[in-house]
Image (cartoon, rainbow, N blue to C red):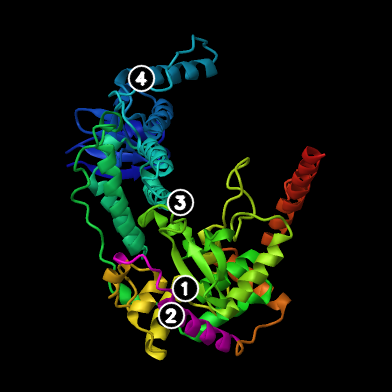
């Protein structure tokens, strides 16, 4: 077993180590060049380079130390580590010798002896690399396939974003340069373990879940020859236990949701974001349901003149598409109590003046240049709620509060609560979903059963809202901005303000501000109509 020491080399030191070698072979690392090692024994002295390839340490043999000067060894060591670091593997012996000759010729030219320059290819792997995907290429190919499936209706866009976010997370990107054929379950298990160590157990579990699906897709006959993935390579991968998840869940009470509602109605948020949070608080629906709401989904309820109805059309994916006889087929419909319906109508009147979008809550700008403006992003609600001072509840916690308060304080049955929440199999502790048969075998929307639950909830929120006192607009706005920046890790507020000022000035100079774009669009529309 060789022993490894460390020493800052010079020519005399190398000569002394070679002359004085005795006993078993030992390695001496050059402190002046990372990775360069001299192995000395009574019978030989050899230069080696230590590097990391495909997640493992490799030792590249360079040659007899008596034929190399220290300068040559250091120069070639740097090139060898660059060769391995570029993902090209260990360089061929011929390439290393060419590099030594090139360094030798460079020394001669510096001494004025001339000599022709030695031509050396940029890379010359010792072993031909696999003609298969790297992890980064595999991620891109999977993304393209999933987007095609989403366009055909086989996958949801949210699923595609989730899967790509998991396999392309910062921890997994460490595998980008490696070939899929050389990645095994222990490599991913190391990523999982690092996430667990950071306290990110939920993320680690997602990595295991999605990676298994990713490898199953790559091992499919349709692309296994291109990917190089081995069938069952991730079969032994185990997800970490999440611990007591139920104990960590937050069950906020009415005052906390009323505080969220008060901030949304205060006016410091944009009109669309504020109203979206209002609708979420009053109806306890999912973020996706709120942001994908369309204007034509809201209409009066003929049976109750002061009430409205919200038909959530996007829910049709799991329930069958609309037909000519049933244009609302597959929708999840909610009755909106008088106060909520009045707020919705007032918002629709306010937003109709600027030109009506099909979306109730349109985005500020398109996702990509030239694309149509879509609906507000789900994360917009999450970030807006997270920045509210004195708030712990998340948007999804509103659903837990709705279920808890209505059943415990208002005597609303679990069946009615489950109908409003639209849960086929509830993950909310306070909901015992006993109405599965009813929802599966009837086409009726059960509005008369849903209405009392939503009326009791909105009355409770309105009453609690009156007790909430908020600071003035300037103070509240400053608190929201500061909390948002704190969560983003911004520590120097003055530097951040200067950065934003520069970005805004550059956008104005390039004509990219929202007002400039809207003005240009209005001008183009006027020219077309003239």
**In the displayed structure image, the side of residue 345 where residue 212 appears, left or right:** left
Which dot marks residue 284?
A: 1
The residues bearing labels 1 and 2 have C-alpha atoms spaced at a distance of 9 Å
The residues bearing labels 2 and 4 have C-alpha atoms spaced at a distance of 68 Å
> Between disc 1 and disc 4, whose residue precedes?
4
Q: Position of residue 83 (x, y in %)?
A: 39, 29
Q: Nearer the viewer, mark 1 or mark 3?
A: 3
**In the displayed structure image, the side of residue 480 where residue 452 appears, left or right:** left
Which dot marks residue 401?
A: 2
In the rendered structure, which segment of residues is drawn in magenta?
440-465
In the rendered image, the residue lying farthest to the right is 530
Q: Nearer the viewer, mark 1 or mark 4?
A: 1
Q: Nearer the viewer, mark 3 or mark 2?
A: 3
Nearer to us in this view, 392 or 90: 392
Q: Is residue 268 above or below residue 108?
A: below
Residue under label 4: 95
CB atoms of marks 1 and 2 within 8 Å? yes
CB atoms of marks 3 and 2 within 8 Å? no
Which dot marks residue 324?
A: 3
The residues bearing labels 4 and 3 have C-alpha atoms spaced at a distance of 72 Å
**462 inside magenta stretch:** yes
Q: Position of residue 356 (x, y in %)?
A: 67, 56
Which dot marks residue 217?
A: none
């Amino acid at each position: 077993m060789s022993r490894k020491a460390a020493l800052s080399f010079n020519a005399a030191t190398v000569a002394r180590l070679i002359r004085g070698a005795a006993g078993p072979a030992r390695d001496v690392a050059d402190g002046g060049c990372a990775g360069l090692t001299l192995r000395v024994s009574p019978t030989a002295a050899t230069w080696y380079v230590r590097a990391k390839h495909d997640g493992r340490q490799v030792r590249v043999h360079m040659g007899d130390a008596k034929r190399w000067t220290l300068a040559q060894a250091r120069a070639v060591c740097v090139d060898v580590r660059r060769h391995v670091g570029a993902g090209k593997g260990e360089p061929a012996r011929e390439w290393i010798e060419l590099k030594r000759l090139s360094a030798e010729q460079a020394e001669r030219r510096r001494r004025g002896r001339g000599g022709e320059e030695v031509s050396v290819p940029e890379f010359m792997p010792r072993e031909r690399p696999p003609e298969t995907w790297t992890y980064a290429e595999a991620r891109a190919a999977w993304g393209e396939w999933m987007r095609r499936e989403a366009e055909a209706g086989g996958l949801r866009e949210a699923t595609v974003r989730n899967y790509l976010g998991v396999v392309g997370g910062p921890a997994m990107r460490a595998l980008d340069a490696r070939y899929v054929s050389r990645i095994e379950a222990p490599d991913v298990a190391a990523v999982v373990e690092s996430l667990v160590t950071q306290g990110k157990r939920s993320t680690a579990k997602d990595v295991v879940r999605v990676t298994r699906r990713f490898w199953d897709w790559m091992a499919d006959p349709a692309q296994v020859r291109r990917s190089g993935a081995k069938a069952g390579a991730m079969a032994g991968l185990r997800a970490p236990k999440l611990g007591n998840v139920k104990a960590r869940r937050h069950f906020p009470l009415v005052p906390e949701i009323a505080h969220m509602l008060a901030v949304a109605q205060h006016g410091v948020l944009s009109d669309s974001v504020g109203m979206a949070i209002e609708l979420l608080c009053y109806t306890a629906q999912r973020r996706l349901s709120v942001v994908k709401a369309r204007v034509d989904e809201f209409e009066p309820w003929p049976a109750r003149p002061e009430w409205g109805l919200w038909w959530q059309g996007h829910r049709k994916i799991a329930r069958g598409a609309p037909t000519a006889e049933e244009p609302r087929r597959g929708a999840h419909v909610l009755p909106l109590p008088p106060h909520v319906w009045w707020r919705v109508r007032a918002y629709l009147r306010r937003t109709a003046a600027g030109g009506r979008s099909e979306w109730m809550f349109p985005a500020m700008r398109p996702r990509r240049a030239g694309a149509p403006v879509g609906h507000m992003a789900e994360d917009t609600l999450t970030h807006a709620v997270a920045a509210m001072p004195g708030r712990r509840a998340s948007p999804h916690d509103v659903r837990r509060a709705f279920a808890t308060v209505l059943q415990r304080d208002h005597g609303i049955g679990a069946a009615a609560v489950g109908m409003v929440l639209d849960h086929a199999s509830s993950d909310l502790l306070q909901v015992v979903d006993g109405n599965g048969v009813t929802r599966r075998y009837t086409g009726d929307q059960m509005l008369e059963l849903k209405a009392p639950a939503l009326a009791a909830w909105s009355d409770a929120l309105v009453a609690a809202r009156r007790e909430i006192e908020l600071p003035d607009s300037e103070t509240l706005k400053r608190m929201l901005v500061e909390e948002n920046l704190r969560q983003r890790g911004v520590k120097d507020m003055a530097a951040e303000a200067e950065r934003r000022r520069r970005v805004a000035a550059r956008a104005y100079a390039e004509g990219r501000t929202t007002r400039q774009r809207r003005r240009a669009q209005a001008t183009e529309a006027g020219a077309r109509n003239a």
